[in-house]
Amino acid sequence: MKKLIGSFILVLLVLQACQKPEPQTNNTLPEGATPYTEADIQFVPYTSQNKVFKRMPALDSTWTITFKERVRTEEYFAWDQTYFTFDHNPNLELELRLRYLQTDNSQKTLAVYMPYPDAGGTYRTNLFEMPITSDNLETGFFQDLIEYHDTIVLNSIEWYDVFEVNELLSTDAEKDGPQNFSKIYYNTVYGIIYMIQNNGTNWVLQQ
């Protein structure tokens, strides 16, 4: 009986570790952190707009990500969350979460949880994270994960102040799938402007 209870507790701990961290429910800042300002929070530009993406290069297929809600705490610090769903599959929920870097509470970041079905049909998310400033990207935690572009041309459109973001951690093979995302491009005016999937499909924000 004791072995059975111990095994059950172990399974629960493993399942909890695989889930996204839940928002904080108190107004206590992590040690070393500074409160989010209104300017910081505007790093995520979404308020209520739906966004339309076209499949490259022929622009012959459309994805609409539908704004669901934006949740903010009373104070201007982490756990500001914005949610979208995909029109072709409402089970796919995209989340953008302002928070602090887990290994350095002094660094404010945006975590983007990109949803996808794995090869077996289970819905999962892939994490992309970026700092809310381009300062010191070449030497800091994100130096091998992010490339910052003052300007970049995508779909014959010139975009400014763009973060080219790779997945934070490589996806385990058994949790991967062709519809998983391998890279996103982001700026503070439009949010996500370009998405690349494992199957080679690229999606660009319609302008």
Image (cartoon, helix red, strand yellow):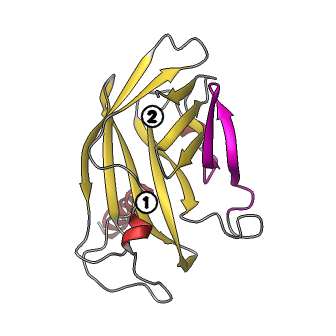
Determine whether 75 is above or below 10 in the image.
Answer: below
Q: Amino acid at mark 2?
A: Tyr
Q: Can residue 19 be seen in this snapshot?
A: no
Q: Residue at x 58, y 75 (%)?
A: 103
Magenta stretch: includes residue 160: yes
Query: In the shown orientation, is residue 194 left or right of residue 2?
Result: right
Residue 77 % position (x, y): 36, 75
Q: Are marks 2 and 1 in contact (CB under 8 Å)?
A: no
> Which contiguous range is marked in magenta?
142-170
Residue 190 % position (x, y): 46, 44
Displayed quadrant of residue 38: bottom left
- The residue beneath circle 1 is 14
Q: Residue at x 40, y 59 (%)?
A: 97
Label 2: state its secondary structure: strand
- The residue beneath circle 2 is 116
Q: Amino acid at mark 1?
A: Val
Q: Nearer the viewer, residue 50 or 1?
A: 50
Q: Nearer the viewer, residue 104 or 151?
A: 151
Displayed quadrant of residue 42: bottom left
